[in-house]
């Protein structure tokens, strides 16, 4: 199937990029908190049942990595610069 060209207003794209930056910042903050001793627990009715810190840290780390890759691609298109190393790694 061929590609379909769609016009998306630049303001909407900027909002998406800002949302991605915010999500990356929140995830990076959570990784920092975990690295500095905070823990996350699964639980029921306010009673912790299982330490979920490593699982959450992994998820947050993936968010940071994936969003950074997306924002690098976004910047490459908008700033008309050559792709970065993370762009090349994403194509593999």
Image (spheres, helix red, strand yellow):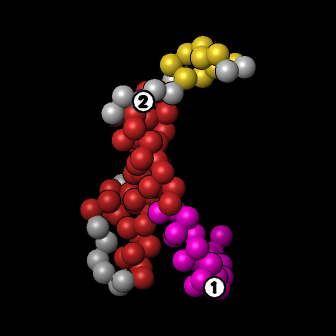
* 15 drawn magenta: yes
Disc 1: CA contacts within 10 A as few (<14), some (14-19) or many (>=20):
few
Pinpoint residue 1: horizontal percent, then vertical percent. 65, 70
Residue name at image x 46 percent, y 47 percent:
27
Q: Is residue 32 above or below residue 73?
A: above
Q: Are marks 2 and 1 in contact (CB under 8 Å)?
A: no
Q: Marks 2 and 1, how far apart in space?
A: 41 Å
Q: Is residue 55 left or right of residue 32?
A: right
Q: Is residue 81 left or right of residue 25?
A: left
Q: Is residue 54 left or right of residue 12?
A: left
Pinpoint residue 30: horizontal percent, then vertical percent. 44, 42
Pinpoint residue 86: horizontal percent, then vertical percent. 32, 59
Residue name at image x 33 percent, y 33 percent:
36
Q: Which residue is mark 2?
A: 38
- 14 or 26: nearer the eye? 26
- 3 or 78: nearer the eye? 78
Q: Which residues are magenta?
A: 1-21
Q: Is residue 13 above or below residue 57?
A: below
What mark, if any, has residue 9 been given in the picture? 1
Residue lying at the far front of the rendered structure: 46
């Amino acid at each position: 199937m061929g590609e379909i060209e769609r016009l998306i207003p630049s303001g909407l794209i900027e909002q998406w990029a800002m949302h991605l930056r915010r999500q990356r910042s929140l995830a990076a903050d959570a990784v920092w908190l975990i690295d500095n001793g905070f823990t996350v627990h699964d639980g029921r009715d306010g009673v912790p049942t299982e330490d979920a810190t490593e699982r959450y840290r992994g998820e947050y780390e993936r968010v940071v990595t994936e969003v950074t890759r997306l924002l690098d691609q976004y910047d490459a298109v908008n700033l008309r610069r050559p792709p970065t190393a993370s762009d090349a790694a994403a194509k593999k």
